[in-house]
Amino acid sequence: MQEKHVDTYREEAHELLSELESSLLELEGSPGDIELVGRIFRAMHTIKGSGAMFGFDEIAAFTHEVETVFDNVRHGTLQVTRDLIDLTLKARDCIRLMLDEPDNKSSEEMAAAILSSLRALVSGGDESDTHLLETAEAIREESCAPAAAEGGSQTYRIRFTPARHLFRTGTNPLPLLNELRSLGECSVTTYFGAIPPLEAIDPESCYAKWDVILTTSQGLNAVKDVFIFVENDAEVSIEAIDENPSGEGDVKRLGEILVDRGDVDRQDVERVLQDRKPIGELLVESGVTTSANVI
């Protein structure tokens, strides 16, 4: 079964590499076309994500580095140039070599040379950086710092309901949840209510779904990108929600999730919230401060 999934990945990766090539050639004539940049980013993101799931770790690691460069292009911190397009075309050839000839060691030298050139491109000619991702992220964070100060973080409620056949595609949902966790403060609630009796369980079917509360400064596109390569095999809802300055936000959001799922009644949630002691009283009882400080 796994070999079948690997063959499927190779086939899809070849299609994505062809799409990548055509998009790069179009971008050469329209370097300001942000839609083309998005197509290139999504193709590499899919190759990376699916590659990691099917054990193509070298492809995933290499593609992640190149993807990071185009993430900077998407955010306006790096311009599209002929050198960037040429290097990305070479990266596409390198990925194809890794895919078709995994035992060919020449791909390692090829990948190293491409990443070295990309480091120089991103850092303005200085190849002393040891890791492309660190360089690109530093440039992006510096450029985005004023926007972050103005807009701050945003909290999203994400409902991720995989199709029942998800496992049959060879997809593991756990890396997606881990990728969400890497974006910021994240709370994940798993719902197992659809699991049938033991005798009726199909081990190749996915019965779980997830509710996620994520607070991140990375923006909505970064959240959407996590689900790019399962968008046809899952229902994904992403909703921006307001933070609650009273400190009860996490409890209320979790309560809303449980109410929506039918696990508890709304009246019970409201009763529990009303019975909660004020934060000042809890701090005094725990001994970390005095009543005089919280008046």
Image: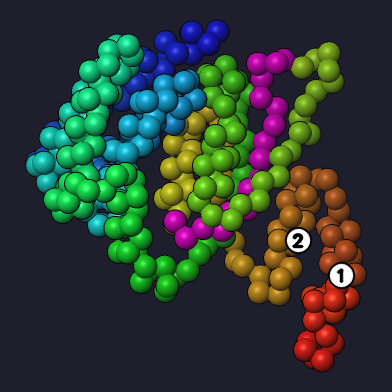
Q: Residue at x 36, y 71 (%)?
A: 146
Mark 1 and mark 2 residues within 8 Å of each other at the beta carbon = yes
Secondary element type, mark 1: loop
x, y (%) of residue 245? Answer: 66, 74
* Residue 75 is covered by the magenta coloring: no
x, y (%) of residue 14? Answer: 30, 18
In magenta, the rendered stretch is 202-218
Please state the total of marks drawn on the protein image.
2
Image position of 236 with respect to 242: above or below = above
Q: Circle 1 sits on which residue?
A: 276
Secondary element type, mark 2: helix
Circle 1: residue type: Arg
Tell me, yes or no, if residue 24 can be seen here: no
Circle 2: residue type: Val
Q: Residue at x 49, y 31 (%)?
A: 230
Image position of 108 with respect to 122: above or below = above
Looking at this view, is 246 or 237 the one in front?
246
Q: Residue at x 72, y 15 (%)?
A: 202
Quarter occupied by the N terminus:
top right
x, y (%) of residue 264? Answer: 85, 50
Taking 235 as reference, is 44 left or right? Answer: left
Looking at this view, is 112 or 183 the one in front?
112
Residues at marks 1 and 2, CA–CA distance in whole angstroms: 10 Å
